[in-house]
Amino acid sequence: MKKATNYLLVALILIGSACQQKAKEESQAEEVAAISDDERMAWWRDAKFGMFIHWGAYAVPGGERNGEVCKGGAEWIMDKLDYTIEDYENQVVANFNPTQFDAKKWVGMAKDAGMKYIVITSKHHDGFCLWDSEVTDYDIMDSSPFKRDIIKELSVACKEAGIKFCFYHSIVDWHHPQAQAPLYPNYNAGQKDQSVFNPEFPKYYENYLKPQVKELLTNYGDVGVVWFDGDWIPDYTTEMGKEMYNMILEMQPRTIVNNRVDKGRNGMEGMDKEGNFAGDFGTPEQEIPATGIDEDWESCMTMNGSWGYKPSDTNWKSSEDLIQKLVDIVSKGGNFLLNIGPDPQGLFPPESVERLSDMGDWIDVNGEALYGASASPYDRPEWGRYTAKDGVIYAHVFDWPEDGVLKINSEIKVKKASLLADNTQVLSFDESGIALPAEAVDGAVSVIMIEL
Ligand code: GLC
């Protein structure tokens, strides 16, 4: 009798929780249907400026092995300097112990720089995972001495600071046995032959890649953007991409996904314009499209030449250049995702800290001309760029005119012109243009606010 009651109870509980689960799924599905793409994209379109963080065990060698420096991005060192999987595990991952890592500090620096979202590499091509993953031991908890869930700490710090937490996730995996390229005994990095397939890859996709993305969407709160990479390998198909995209939106209907979830990227630049592929925005890499693209897009860029920490690369872009790039991008309707490659202790390189701080100072004064602004409705002026907001045009002056007159587009009917840095300084104007003070207000970009 007692046994029978217990069975009944268990059955009731099971039915109850199945109903609950079903109701949850249904309400999520309704939410997907309820949110338009414009609503979903709104915060991102206004945000303009985000921080990319390429961080993983590759920070330990920093692009250098036995005195040899790898070409290009230091996050590719496993492939470029021919580590075997075992050597990489023992020499690199086992030594990743970033005891100086302080998520709050990182997020604080992003926020002070005027960035509104952070995209961190949960897993790069080397396969090492920065979070506590249930589906592998090749993660920060089990294979490195650090044993702190970096993704957890960062997602919590982002939430506290009002910064959108986002993650980059590599489709490529040089460590997983089922993700190896058939022609290249050392993982799939160099797989150039697009006609040779790995028959095991669908298993990796189904039993590893998808469950990992699910974990990241389940255990770390709201995710702003999922940023895929590694879409180029032949084993990853457009069917997989579309399924992945739909899975993400079913789990978190407000999440935005980049174009590299599918196979439709057009070189480095954009998206498939016909809508044959999944993805919400194009990802021009290390470049700014000459005239913008007719779709949502985000330029990602490094401050020196490497995504991962690479102390031998001292080719830093100046703060002035980075501020002008940000303005250029916003004037063309895009977002700027600017990269940091933290060191193996968990610190941002001092050169990056300095640039973030300079950008933050500029944005403190001029942010109004960027956030929520739209692309310039006019052709690019010789002296700089325009951005626009309701009833206002912002003239971003890169090159201060020698004759002191800012020649503006003839369609702009000026009601009032002033310096954004000091709006008590009203500027006179006539048909020839706006009369400027003798000296540029800002060494990088001075902004003139033009009310229409
Ligand atoms: C390039 C690099 C890769 C990096 C990515 C960011 O594809 O090869 O390492 O993560 O750019 O967009």
Image (cartoon, rainbow, N blue to C red):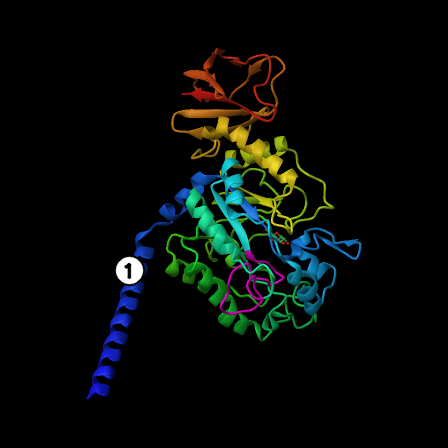
The span shown in magenta is 122-142
Give the quadrant of the N terminus.
Answer: bottom left
Query: Taking 423 as reference, is 60 left or right?
Result: right
Query: Taking 360 as reference, is 424 left or right?
Result: left
Q: Where is residue 83 in the image (x, y as percent from the top left)?
A: 72, 64
Q: What element carries label 1?
A: helix
Q: Where is residue 301 in the image (x, y as percent from the top left)?
A: 60, 44
In depth, the one of 420 and 349 nearer the eye is: 349
Query: Taking 154 as reference, is 7 left or right?
Result: left
Which of the 4 image quadrants contains residue 392?
top left
Q: Which residue appears at 60% of the width and 26% of the height?
A: 444
Specify whether residue 258 is in view: no
Residue that lies at the very extreme toward the right in this rendered image: 67
Query: Taking 105 as reference, is 95 left or right?
Result: right
Q: Position of residue 34 (x, y in %)?
A: 30, 53
* Magenta segment includes 244: no
Is 407 drawn above or below residue 100 in the view shown?
above
Q: Which residue appears at 46% of the width and 51% of the height?
A: 155
Q: Which residue appears at 21% of the width and 86% of the height?
A: 2
User: Which three-letter amino acid code belongs to the residue tagged 1?
Assistant: Ser
In depth, the one of 181 and 16 nearer the eye is: 16
Q: Name the residue under label 1.
A: 27
